[in-house]
Image (cartoon, rainbow, N blue to C red):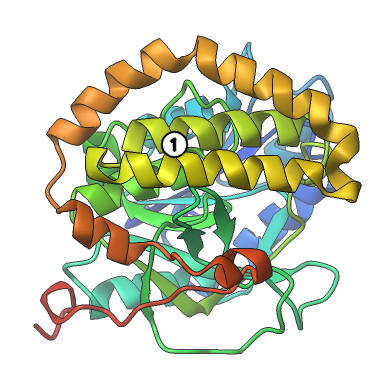
Amino acid sequence: MDDAAPEDKPQLSVCVIAYNSGPLLRRCLESLAAQTLRGFEILVIDNASPDPADAEIAAGFAGVRLVRNSENLGFAGAGNQGARLARGRWYVLLNPDAWAEPDWLEQLLAAARRHPQVRSFTSRQLMAEDPGMLDGLGDVMSGYGIPYRGGYLAPDPGDTPEAEVFSPCGAAMMIDRALFLAMGGFDEQFFCYCEDVDLGYRLQLAGEPTVVVPSAVVRHEGSATSGGRKSEFAVFHGTRNRFWVVFKDTPLLLIPLVLPLHLAAVAYISSRRDNRAQAGVVWRAFVAALKGLPQVMRSRRSVQKARRVSALQLARAMTWDPKDLVYRRPVIRPLRPTRSGGA
């Protein structure tokens, strides 16, 4: 944990955002205490958890900086709060429902040294209940405007080469803190879900790559603290926020293609038998998305004004193969020479 003297600036600041996390938080913090890398700081943000256990658990770990919020800022707001409070050059996010292998931070930092021109990294995530299966190998953005964790529920391919992915997954990511703050951090309008994809999309637009580090491994119980992947909370926020990502981040030349595909994909997904019970939630999410559209469009103007890549370059970073989306196949591209340390 934080072995550095108070006046020393740590290389990394790890932020864990807790909300009714309970025993999961303890396991997460135990994994950070067991890291082979030393000299980093840990911030735990208790995001106004109704259950006092989160704060009590965090307070029991030496060296943890505990921040207690009086209101729930969502993952986006608390993530930005953590970045402002952090002291390290690298800002690391780890979900409370994830726990890291002992060399996780060491591997992330080693990757940053190998690729000094890269400022955003993501981890290899394994299923908590079955480490032989992937929870994600970087996030993918499809041409349908539907993002997904690459390789979700696929067999773990092991320690594959480091390469570029569309977006980091907020469950276990590392980003240059100055870059994160300069990009405006997470969009707090999103509150929770897809705020990491939105950030990754904006990084893509700015010409900033994200590299997946397969040797940096965490095990993850996805959506364990928000009621599950198909809970009303998850479906509502996921549907609404995906719609906002499409409108906010998609270059104008791609909107006539992506928007109809997105609407068709949502309609198809909602019509499937196992999703029909959530049709009302999806409709409420679309109504909420439309109500929030004026603010999203204001954000869009600044995002597109700061864009540094062409629509074609952005399109090439996405996947347009419907089979990738259906089977959640990872989409990993070779690290471009100009972005690697060996360039």
Query: Foreground residue, 213 or 65?
Result: 213
Give the answer, above or below, for where 90 lies relative to 70.
Answer: below
The one nearer the camera, 134 or 144, is 144
Within-10-Å neighbours for mark 1: few <14, some 14–19, many 20+: many
Residue 175 in sight: yes
Q: Residue 44 is drawn in which quadrant?
A: top right
Q: Which residue appears at 13% of the width and 32% of the height?
A: 305
Residue 11 lies, in percent from the top left, at 32, 57
Q: Quadrant of residue 152?
A: bottom right
Q: Which residue occupies 82% across, 44% down?
A: 228
Image label count? 1
**On the rendered structure, is 172 left or right of 3?**
right
- Looking at the picture, how far across and down is residue 136, in whole percent? 61, 67
Q: Is residue 82 visible?
A: no
* Quadrant of image for the C terminus: bottom left
Question: Is residue 8 rendered to the left or right of residue 293?
Answer: left
* Closer-to-camera residue (330/65): 330
Residue 213: horizontal and vertical position, in percent? 44, 76
Q: Residue at x 34, y 76 (%)?
A: 111
Q: Is residue 249 above or below residue 272?
A: above
Is residue 55 shown above or below 319?
above
Q: Secondary structure at mark 1?
A: helix
**In terms of image quadrants, where is residue 151?**
bottom right
Residue 221 appears left or right of 313: right
Q: Name the residue: 60% across, 74% down.
A: 102
Q: Position of residue 91 (x, y in %)?
A: 38, 49
Mark 1 belongs to which amino acid? Val
**Residue beneath label 1, please?**
245
Name the side, left or right, on which 9 lies relative to 21. Answer: left
